[in-house]
Image: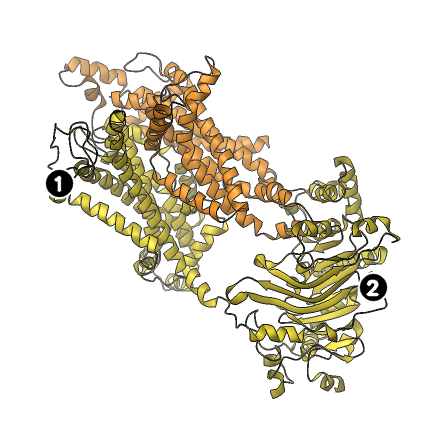
Amino acid sequence: MTALPPPDAGLAGLADPAEPGPQAAAQAVARARPRPLLRSLLRDPLGVASLAVLLIIVVCCALAPVIAPYQQGASDFTRELSGPSAAHWLGTDELGRDILTRLLYGGQVTLLAAALATAIAVLIGTALGVAAGYLRGRTDRVLTFWGDLLLTIPVLVVLIVVVSVFPSSLYPAMLPLGLLLSAAPMRVIRSVTLAIREDLYIEAARVSGLSHWQIMRRHVLPRIYGPIVVQATLAASVAVMLASGLGFLGFGVQVPAPSWGTMVAEAASEYQQQAWFLVPTGGIIALTVLSLGLLGDALRDAVTGQWTGQAAGRLAIRRRSGALSDADRTAASPRTLAPDTTTAPLLAVRDLRVTVPGPDGGTVLVSGMSFDLLPGRTLAIVGESGCGKSVTARALLGVTPAGGRIDGSIRLRGTGPAGTDTSRAEKAGGESIELAGARESQWRTVRGRRIAFVGQEPMSGLDPVQTVGAALSEVIRAYSGCGRRQARSRALALLRRVRLDDPERVARLYPHQISGGMAQRVTIARALAGDPEILVADEPTTALDVTIQADILALLRSLQLTSEIAVLLVTHDWGVVAGLADDVLVMYAGQAVERSAAEEVFDAPRHPYTEALLRSDPHGSVRGRELPVIAGTVPPPGQWPAGCRFAGRCGYVTADCTAAEPALTLAEPGHEARCIHADLLAAR
Amino acid sequence: MLRYLLRRLLLSIPLLFVVSILTFIMVAIVPGDPAVRILGAGHTAAQYQALDQKLGLTAPIGVQYWHWVDGVLHGTLGTSLFTNQTVTSELAQRLPTTIWLVIGATLVTVVAGVALGLASAVWRGPLGRVVDAASWITFAVPNFWLGLILVEFIAVKARLLPSIGYVPLGQDPGGWLRSLILPVVTLSAVGVTGIAKQTRDAMAEVLSREFIAALRMAGLSRRSLLLRHALRNAAIPIVTAAGLFSIAMLGGTILVEQVFVLPGMGSLVVQAASDHDLPVIEGAVLYFTLIVIALNLLIDLSYAWLNPRVRVTA
């Protein structure tokens, strides 16, 4: 019937090989050291169960002459079409023959035919797949085209042609069936081989003068047996189904010999007298196909689990509980933070904490973050990758990784009904809003309209199947509810505002047709569409070429000058900080370690981490001298050490550093640092 | 766009040749002499000679194939050995039933499958497990058997729908629809759950991509994110799967027409196969292949509609 693999194989075998799923699995397989597949399989209860059911069915059918309760063809005319009984466990058919006996003998035909087709499919599929993946080039293109072709042939139609000439045996039809089923294994084996081919030792074998044939046979084949076994079970499930289908149509056996398919046809002609007859006949086919499908699924998991499952399992974040979170709380006491009082903050963040769910109450990604965003000013958050900068930035828009939770306070100022800017006052509605713990519907009134976001990778921030103009019109209409035409003219105005030449043309282009710099201007235009008061820019220039970086920075600066917007800028580039930031907040391992005006931080850093970061900045490096780097890496969330989190990489470290976690304290007016040696740094 | 379609159409020509050549080769390599089988036991040598000539089986296989291709190019597919009708007229009578079955099953597969997949992508948990279980069950249960069960429960016991037979559309549209419901459900069961699973997985992949987070942070509604952006981007693997399912369902019509006694190409080809009516078989295979090419073209069209990159580069 369907020539498709079982549901959980997805269409892995058939899908575009360029898609990530099968490709990644293929590479995984390639890198895995072959481990006993059976042992991995035996850990999966569903895999064990399906293997057991399958073995029982196959062995019982093979032993039919020995174990069948009745002679083949024996009839009991006193019990025609009876239901299950002690004498006939599965009942009898219209001639009083024992159904169990006939199922066992019929299975011999159906299963043998399916095995034949499977063997052919796997042999052809493996041979062509290895050839295509190993030889690549023209061979690959021709074979891939051939495989695509096979996939579009309606299998059953072709099989009918064969059985029409040779109606009393299933076996001749299994040759073309095997050929047609070889397309799926071929695709999978090809991508696995492609991945293996890149391995160094294959390269070495080639250099040492082994022939292609020897390499394929000795080095490639032994490593792909896992995927081959998986593909074999999947092909077998389809083959059983099709062999049964042919039997149902009346082909493949000579009456009165049984096959599973013909027995369903017999049951079909009697179902008005005895519906039970349908149950065991269809049931055995379903059970066999299901077992094969589930077995293939379990095997596939075992094959890929040889690398992903186990490796990932061991690397899983182990969280050390209680003590750490208590330390976080004390460290983040708001008393040490002196909010700027000269201008009321637009956004006041206090003790922000982001937690992702997990064992032991989850893993803390960011904790104790407190800062203010002021109109017309830029706060830069600086730190290495993995410090929690982006997590903090996105939390301001209510977006957290993997269903994380936001605690603490994010308070957005209401401009009040007496505010000068009426449109903003309307949006603000007077009262200030607490965003931490806000509902999604409440967040939606803020996102884009009051707080806008510009991300790191401009291309991946745009819907690939939407034109630039459509993307802008969509958000404009969502914000203002205006008509299509008006949205379009506003979109063009926005594109002009971000200084894109020929906005009419750009509006018609898709993301893949524009450059990274243009795409970033488009995302900035989208961010401006709601006339926001706050712009959160997460590494807006990191993914761009150096010359374009400068353009984008100049654009951001001029936008800020004209619209009194508050900017939160996430970056690891001190050059960007120097160019844009008024204030700087340095983050390390999920917490703020230093906070001050930008000049202060450049001139006199008070935290060793800031000092080390500044020293490793290529902008300030001396020609001919090695660029200093900070040894070690940022500890990942959940593995933060007790005491000062930077102690392990710090040049100033003393015994006191690891005793207790230092608090963020005022080192001098307007300058905070989380270091017990802050004064030592000032003295240098 | 037109050029893209023409190019795709040109690429399907090899399929026509591969399938028809395969058909010829298979008939040739499989042991057994059609003429003998048609005449049965007790024929005379003269009868045998005459039939062999009529079938053109004395010529080498290449020549036989050439004759057939020549006939196709002139619009004739020969005459049925049994009914003496031309193959084209036999097929013309049978074509609508099969086409309606495939169209109906494809529509149901896509609409119900995508809806179910979307629902299980949005409300994960129990519904997702139901879809998983249903996709395994529909995968394992033979569709001819499922059809029999549906006939038993819905047509015979509950008397809700006719159990067998086909009413032409022109004769009685209501009856036509009723006669197609059970066959279409039977044919599309595996496709619906398969597409549901594919949709759910593709949606999960797209929803984890950065542009969805960016659009969410731009304040778009959940509805717009799911339907306008995620589903549109997830559509390409869904269409690929739907194409493969519809080709599989085209083959499945052979079994389903048998179960529901529908006068389609599938039942024609089964009858022809039992009768060794070679011209009919070869003509039917050609028609089936043409339907596949039409389906492929439809898939290519939807690719182009869904993915701007295809439109521009092709």
Q: What coloring was used for the rendering? A: by chain
Residue at x 18% of width, y 37% of height: A85
As drawn, the chain in yellow is: A
In the picture, measured across the screen, residue A238 lies left or right of residue A633, that is: left
User: What kind of element bears circle 1?
Assistant: loop
Q: Identify the subunit bearing mark 2.
A: A
B151 left or right, relative to A637:
left
User: Residue B35, image x and y in percent?
Assistant: 21, 20
- Label 1 and label 2: CA atoms lie apart by 91 Å
Identify the mark at residue A69; answer none if there is no mark.
Answer: 1
Residue type of the residue flagged with mark 2: Ala
Quick one: label 1 or label 2, which is nearer the N terminus?
A: 1
| Disc 2, SS | loop
Identify the hue of chain B.
orange
Kindly identify the residue that appears in the image at 43 percent across and 61 percent down: A309
Q: Which residue is more in the foreground, B301 or A664? A: A664
Q: Quadrant of the C terminus of chain A?
A: bottom right
Does the image show residue A633?
no
| Three-letter residue code for mark 1 | Pro
**Dot 1: within a 10 Å radius of its alpha carbon, few (fewer than 14), some, or many (20 or more) residues?**
some
Q: Quadrant of residue A548?
A: bottom right
Which residue lies under the disc numbered 2? Answer: A344
- Residue in front for this viewpoint, A324 or A203: A324
Q: Quadrant of the N terminus of chain A?
A: top left
| Residue at image coords 77%, 76% | A671
